[in-house]
């Protein structure tokens, strides 16, 4: 079955530390890949997306993600986390030929001062 | 990017009443919009696909008579929760897109049914 897995429910990092949020998907072909961020009580904001081409994608707020076909992964990274990055992060996948995203369960990022 | 608005942002209603939530695409036309429901600490669950000028397509397990969707124009879709009950309390999010494979999300509506 097609699925999106975010294995980490919570991640805690210190401010200034690096961050990596994991996302794995299970689809027959390379889908379109997205990372969104959601602050409490807010909607989703697109951080970055991958459709094709360069597998290292730069996004807003200093985030980047790398698509690894061999691992069916699209992990989100940031070299130095700021306290304002504390939020819920969702990986989403849209299969080719579709337009309906499937979301991972989300990873809650906690940032310690 | 494209902007999607939702109104109201928060609503509290009594059990048994109906509540309408509006979703607007402000700077683009959306032939298709999506409605999601999000429970606390959980991911978004697609409820239905709203199609301009035609009936909505509901996901399995979503009661179409309870969650009425109307997509009367290319910039407006509405979700009406009929005869709301406390278990309908949730965060409702809509989305629309310029391209078939990228969605822009509204800020969400927090519904509390007393």
Image: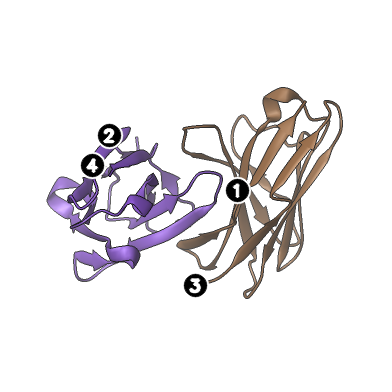
Chain colours: A purple, B brown
* Among the two numbered marks 2 and 4 on one chain, the one whose residue lies closer to the N terminus: 2
Query: Do badges 2 and 3 share one subunit?
Result: no
Q: Which mark is residue A8?
A: 2
Q: Chain of mark 4?
A: A
Q: In the displayed structure, does residue B99 sit left or right of residue A13?
A: right
Q: Secondary structure at mark 3?
A: loop
Task: Tell me whether circle 2 and circle 4 mark residues in contact (CB < 8 Å).
Answer: no
Query: Do badges 3 and 4 share one subunit?
Result: no
Residue A4 position by quadrant = top left
Q: Nearer the viewer, residue B61 or A68?
A: A68
Q: Is residue A21 visible to the viewer in this orientation of the structure?
A: yes
Task: Tell me whether circle 1 and circle 3 mark residues in contact (CB < 8 Å).
Answer: no
Q: Is residue A31 above or below residue B25?
A: above
Q: Which mark is residue B93?
A: 1
Task: Tell me whether circle 2 and circle 3 mark residues in contact (CB < 8 Å).
Answer: no
Please name the residue shown 32% across and 32% down the image.
Answer: A9
Q: Is residue A34 above or below residue A57?
A: above
Q: Closer to us: mark 2 or mark 4?
A: 4
Q: CA distance from mark 2 to mark 3?
A: 29 Å
Crowd band around label 2 with a 10 angstrom C-alpha radius: few (<14), some (14–19), many (20+): some
Q: Secondary structure at mark 2?
A: loop
Task: Tell me whether circle 1 and circle 4 mark residues in contact (CB < 8 Å).
Answer: no
Q: Nearer the viewer, residue A10 or A86?
A: A86
Q: Chain of mark 2?
A: A
Q: Which mark is residue A13?
A: 4
Please name the residue shown 30% across and 38% down the image.
Answer: A6
Q: Which mark is residue B110?
A: none
Q: Which mark is residue B1?
A: 3
Q: Closer to us: mark 3 or mark 4?
A: 4
* Among the two numbered marks 1 and 3 on one chain, the one whose residue lies closer to the N terminus: 3
Crowd band around label 4 with a 10 angstrom C-alpha radius: few (<14), some (14–19), many (20+): some
Q: Position of residue B63 (x, y in %)?
A: 71, 32
């Amino acid at each position: 079955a097609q699925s999106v897995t975010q294995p980490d429910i919570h991640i805690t990092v210190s401010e200034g530390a690096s961050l990596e949020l994991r996302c794995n998907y299970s689809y027959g072909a390379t889908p379109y890949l997205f990372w969104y961020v959601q602050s409490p009580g807010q909607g989703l904001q697109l951080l970055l997306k991958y459709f094709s081409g360069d597998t290292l994608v730069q996004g807003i707020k200093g985030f980047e993600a790398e698509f690894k076909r061999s691992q069916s992964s699209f992990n989100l990274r940031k070299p130095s986390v700021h306290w304002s990055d504390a939020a819920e992060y969702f990986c989403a996948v849209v299969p080719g030929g579709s337009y309906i995203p499937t979301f991972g369960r989300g990873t809650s990022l906690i940032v310690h001062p | 990017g494209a902007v999607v608005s939702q109104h109201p942002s928060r609503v509290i209603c009594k059990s048994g009443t109906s509540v309408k939530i509006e979703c607007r695409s402000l700077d683009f036309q959306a032939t298709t919009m999506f409605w999601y429901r999000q429970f606390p600490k959980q991911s978004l669950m697609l409820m239905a696909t709203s199609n301009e000028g035609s009936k909505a397509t509901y996901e399995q397990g979503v009661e179409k008579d309870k969650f009425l969707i109307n997509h009367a124009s290319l910039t407006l879709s509405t979700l009406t929760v009929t005869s709301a009950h406390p278990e309908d309390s949730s965060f409702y999010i809509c989305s629309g897109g310029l391209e078939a494979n990228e969605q822009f999300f509204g800020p969400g509506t927090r519904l509390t049914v007393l």
